[in-house]
Image (cartoon, rainbow, N blue to C red):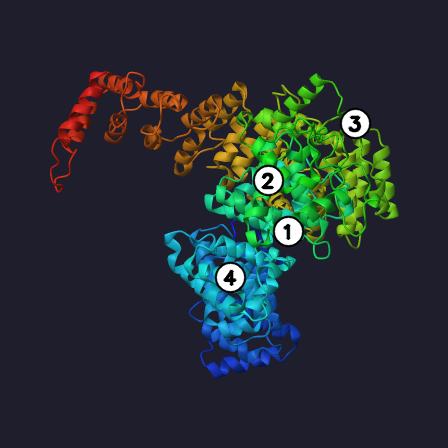
């Protein structure tokens, strides 16, 4: 077995050269090689069966080893998969429970890492298990459907969803026997059908429609168990011809579907179970959204939102995913009283961000409907106040700085009340009115006047509101004008979190909710102050992290919006201390009592804490969460200070060593020292991960420590940071690195510049060619720092660009600030890369919009001997009196390289029309005249 780790064979997961297999993956690897060696040189089927049977009869461990080994052979070796599956069916002794459990773990926990070949084999074995009617195969199909990403029309995702669909189509009789699987299938593929309107998906769309129509027509009452969200999904795809007929029957002839179906209203009054809302969110999305709404402090959320946007919402097709996320947040994530009373980012802020960043009108309508869906048929018996709370708070909190959000949502709600289905207008109005009454009774907001009676609303919308929500509007004045509304709600700030001052114990136990204080006392405040507040609120982009403000191009102004205040009041950690054991509580108290300026003493106290943690028998969440909370609070002063003093040019070893003589770095030192001790290393990673979820600045502090200690951990520092990144909620190296570099840019530019050569060398595959990281760096460079990077590149100590990805970076940089673009071109100039790589840009650059790039190209080509390809791109530019790029460059080449230029022009003019192309009158003459005109400018 010594060759297991070195012999290539089992490749189920896409692992980078830097990634290390975890315990589960090592187990699969070990069992695979065990079975491979067991069957080595055996060709007889009977002998194979005898050997495997003898092995599994030795005990449960051996049985599991053989079964999992055969599973790995099936997933990794397609040609022998049928034989391996046959052997598996013959030797298993537990009704395949072990196999089903491990397949489910692979699907739910490691699906994203699977290779394409393994994915296809996974579908194959699930199909075989379904055909064999294996007990539990329904759960595998539901797990597979959960991994289909909504709004993702990439070939990989489409191929996978079609593979799952084919399994279900081929086994419809089996499918119809499981009500839960049938309901999940209908819910999933009704939603996915929205993404497949394009003609390129005609074949897939027809498969989906055929299956859905058959299941719903034959098993309508079972499908009704989905609840009202079935109607929401059906209404979105009702334009598909086959679905249109079904939709018509549901509305006009309900008895055709089932004698016991009384009509659309009965279905709309049934609440959809959380299990269906969750099934359209992948496990990874579910974890990320849950982390955001349970762990991330309001004000520290922007970097996580940017990551989520980049990961899941970056393409036009992905806009439809927003409605799934909103339904999931409204229906499944109901925060506890403890979270509501904390400064964790509230649900309304995340939903507001999803709405405000949506770029599609259709997707915006679907998202609005997802937000208000439970409002339309609200019932105190069937619904929770938490189902409707985000909707009212999005409108209430955004009326001041984002009035367009509030007006859009109000207009949508009022129109939907009367236009969604006219025969049940009365019932819809009753549901919405009951929702508003419940909101006021539960005191989610103190008053609806800031929303419904706001003078910012236009006349048409005001009329809609008074027509449909008269009960909740203030009485009109005698002259017919709208009464003055109470003061608007205050904007959330760091000093005063967006949640009200009431404690969790004062909130009703059966339904956690948000209770906002009313600002009516401020109604008569000074007008100048009110105007000032309004101006500030309009400039702030804190609420939904909008990126469309002009200031978004200036990183310093944008990123400082949510900087922590150094004068913030200390947080009380007494509650967290009570959750720790006596020894740890005493050690924390000693650290708390130590003078902040006495770094040596604080480092000793921190070492005592680390030693005690490593000596504990069990270190779980019950310990790591309160301990991390205490430590991050006690180290607040350290996180608020800059690591490198401004103007620290001489960064010698002694100065750098002094910079890391602080309590936080004691934990890092122990982490590096214990990297070979798996248990201790895991404990410290767990602690740092919890601290990172509270204080995101910890990441770049770890990078700084590893860079300073590079002499002693040069070989393993990459492993340490990567292990840390994988332990965090972000879960992977790239995103964690990007978050930390962005955070470093916001806090300490000197550290960012210091880290650049280290991260580009140690994490080259994530950094070189990364336009986003390059923008983070050049956005804050000053000329002296730029000169330092140029010197490092010239001396061969730093590589920031490579030919393969350079054109994409240059293209992205066209949208950056002028100095940022100049920095990029300066960095390119000192790399050993020919400027010809930028030739494809020459024709698309505009002299008014891209003057920076054109001027730098002019300088680069000035010192380069022209080639035929260069001349071809230059003379293809449109010439004008304003844009003299081409004429200036040709004139220079005519002076310095006349023979080469004339040869290239002659060749190009002689080859303007291929010989095998029929002559087109005047084409060649026009090309020559255009070229001569261009040359005339010279």
- Residue drawn at the location 88% of the way across and 47% of the way down: 582
- Residue drawn at the location 67% of the way across and 44% of the way down: 390
168 or 764, nearer to the observer: 168
User: Image check: 845 left or right of 894?
Assistant: right
Q: CA distance from mark 3 to mark 2?
A: 27 Å
Say which quadrant the N terminus sits in.
Answer: bottom right
On residue 252, the disc is: 4
Number of marks in picture: 4
In this figure, which residue is indicated by the disc labeled 1?
Answer: 374
Secondary structure, mark 3, is: helix
Q: CA distance from mark 3 to mark 4?
A: 54 Å
Please rate how many residues cluster around mark 1, counting C-alpha atoms within 10 Å: few if below 14, some from 14 to 19, many from 20: many
Secondary structure, mark 4, is: helix
Residue 769 vertical position relative to residue 37 in the rendered view, above or below: above
Q: Which comes sooner in the sequence, label 4 or label 2?
A: 4
Q: CA distance from mark 1 to mark 4?
A: 24 Å
Q: Which comes sooner in the sequence, label 2 or label 1?
A: 1
User: Image check: 507 left or right of 185?
Assistant: right
Please rate how many residues cluster around mark 2, counting C-alpha atoms within 10 Å: few if below 14, some from 14 to 19, many from 20: many
Q: Which comes sooner in the sequence, label 1 or label 4?
A: 4
x and y percent of residue 211 in the render?
A: 46, 66
Res. 500 image quadrant? top right
């Amino acid at each position: 077995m010594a060759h297991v780790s070195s012999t290539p064979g089992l490749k189920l997961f896409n692992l980078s050269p830097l990634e290390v297999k975890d315990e589960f993956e090592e187990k699969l690897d070990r069992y695979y090689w065990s079975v491979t060696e067991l069957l080595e040189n055996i060709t007889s089927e009977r002998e194979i069966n005898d050997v495997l049977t003898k092995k599994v009869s030795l005990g449960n461990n051996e049985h599991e080893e053989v079964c999992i080994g055969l599973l790995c052979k099936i997933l990794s070796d397609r040609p022998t998969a049928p034989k391996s599956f046959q052997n598996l069916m013959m030797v298993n002794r537990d009704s395949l429970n072990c196999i089903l459990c491990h397949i489910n773990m692979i699907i739910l926990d490691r699906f994203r890492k699977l290779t394409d070949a393994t994915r296809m084999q996974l579908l194959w074995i699930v199909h075989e298990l379904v055909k064999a009617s294996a007990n539990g195969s329904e759960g595998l199909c539901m797990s597979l459907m959960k991994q289909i990403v909504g709004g993702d029309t990439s070939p990989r995702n489409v191929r996978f969803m079609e593979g799952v669909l084919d399994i279900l189509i081929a086994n419809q009789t089996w499918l119809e026997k499981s009500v839960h699987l049938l309901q999940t299938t209908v819910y999933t593929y009704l939603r996915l059908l929205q993404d497949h309107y394009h003609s390129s998906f005609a074949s897939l769309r027809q498969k989906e429609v055929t299956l859905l129509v058959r299941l719903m027509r034959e098993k309508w009452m079972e499908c009704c168990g989905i609840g009202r969200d079935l109607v929401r999904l059906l209404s979105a795809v009702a334009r598909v011809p086959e679905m249109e007929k079904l939709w018509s029957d549901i509305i006009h002839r309900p008895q055709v579907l089932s004698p016991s179906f009384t009509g659309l209203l009965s279905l709309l009054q049934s609440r959809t179970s959380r299990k269906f809302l969750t099934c359209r969110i992948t496990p990874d999305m579910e974890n990320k959204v849950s982390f955001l709404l349970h762990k991330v402090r309001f004000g520290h959320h922007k970097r996580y939102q940017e990551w989520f946007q980049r990961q899941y919402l970056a393409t036009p097709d992905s806009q439809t995913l927003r409605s799934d996320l909103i339904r999931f947040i409204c229906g499944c994530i109901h925060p506890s009283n403890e979270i509501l009373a904390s400064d964790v980012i509230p649900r309304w802020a995340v939903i507001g961000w999803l709405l405000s960043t949506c770029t599609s009108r259709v997707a915006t309508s679907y998202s609005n409907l997802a937000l208000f869906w439970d409002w339309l048929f609200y019932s105190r018996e069937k619904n929770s106040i938490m189902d409707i709370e985000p909707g009212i708070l999005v409108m209430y909190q955004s009326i001041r700085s984002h009035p367009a959000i509030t007006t859009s949502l109000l207009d949508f709600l009022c129109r939907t009340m009367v236009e969604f289905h006219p025969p049940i207008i009365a019932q819809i109005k009753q549901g919405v009115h009951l929702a508003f009454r419940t909101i006021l009774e539960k005191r989610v907001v103190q008053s609806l006047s800031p929303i419904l009676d706001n003078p910012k609303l236009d006349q048409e919308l005001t009329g809609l509101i008074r027509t449909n929500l008269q009960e909740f509007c203030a009485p009109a004045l005698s002259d017919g004008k709208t009464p003055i509304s109470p003061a608007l709600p205050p904007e959330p700030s760091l000093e005063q979190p967006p949640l009200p001052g009431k404690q969790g114990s004062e909130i009703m136990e059966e339904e956690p909710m948000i209770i906002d204080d009313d600002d009516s006392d401020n109604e008569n405040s000074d007008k100048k102050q009110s105007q000032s507040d309004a101006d500030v609120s309009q400039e702030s982009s804190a609420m939904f992290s909008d990126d469309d403000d002009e200031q978004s191009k200036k990183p310093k102004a944008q990123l400082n919006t949510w900087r922590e205040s150094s004068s913030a009041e200390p947080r009380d950690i007494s509650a967290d201390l009570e959750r720790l054991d006596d020894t740890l509580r005493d050690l924390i108290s000693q650290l708390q009592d130590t003078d902040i300026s006495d770094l040596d003493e604080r480092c000793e106290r921190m070492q005592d804490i680390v030693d005690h943690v490593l000596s504990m028998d069990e270190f779980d969440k019950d310990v790591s969460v309160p301990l991390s909370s205490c430590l991050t609070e006690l180290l607040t002063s350290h996180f608020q200070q800059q690591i490198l003093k401004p103007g620290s040019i001489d960064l010698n070893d002694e100065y750098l060593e002094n910079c890391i003589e602080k309590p936080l770095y004691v934990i890092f030192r122990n982490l590096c020292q214990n990297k070979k001790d798996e248990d201790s290393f895991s404990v410290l990673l767990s602690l740092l991960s919890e601290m990172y979820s509270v204080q995101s600045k910890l990441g770049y502090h770890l990078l700084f420590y590893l860079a300073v200690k590079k002499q002693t951990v040069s070989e393993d520092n990459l492993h340490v940071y990567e292990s840390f990144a994988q332990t965090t909620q972000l879960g992977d190296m790239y995103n964690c690195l990007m978050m930390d570099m962005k955070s470093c840019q916001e806090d300490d530019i000197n550290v960012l510049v210091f880290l650049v050569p280290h991260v580009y060398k140690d994490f080259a595959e994530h950094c070189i060619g990364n336009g986003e990281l390059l923008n983070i760096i050049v956005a804050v460079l000053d000329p002296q720092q730029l000169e330092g990077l140029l010197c490092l590149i010239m001396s061969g100590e730093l590589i920031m660009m490579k030919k393969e990805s350079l054109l994409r970076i240059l293209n992205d940089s066209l949208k950056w600030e002028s100095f940022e673009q100049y920095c990029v071109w300066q960095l390119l100039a000192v790399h050993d890369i020919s400027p010809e790589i930028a030739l494809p840009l020459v024709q698309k650059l505009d002299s008014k919009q891209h003057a920076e790039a054109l001027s730098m190209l002019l300088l680069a080509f000035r010192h380069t001997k022209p080639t035929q390809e260069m001349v071809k791109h230059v003379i293809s530019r449109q010439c004008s009196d304003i844009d003299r790029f081409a004429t200036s460059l040709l004139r220079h080449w005519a002076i310095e390289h006349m023979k080469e230029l004339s040869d290239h022009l002659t060749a190009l003019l002689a080859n303007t029309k291929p010989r095998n192309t029929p002559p087109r009158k005047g084409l060649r003459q026009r090309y020559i005249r255009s070229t001569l005109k261009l040359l005339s400018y010279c």
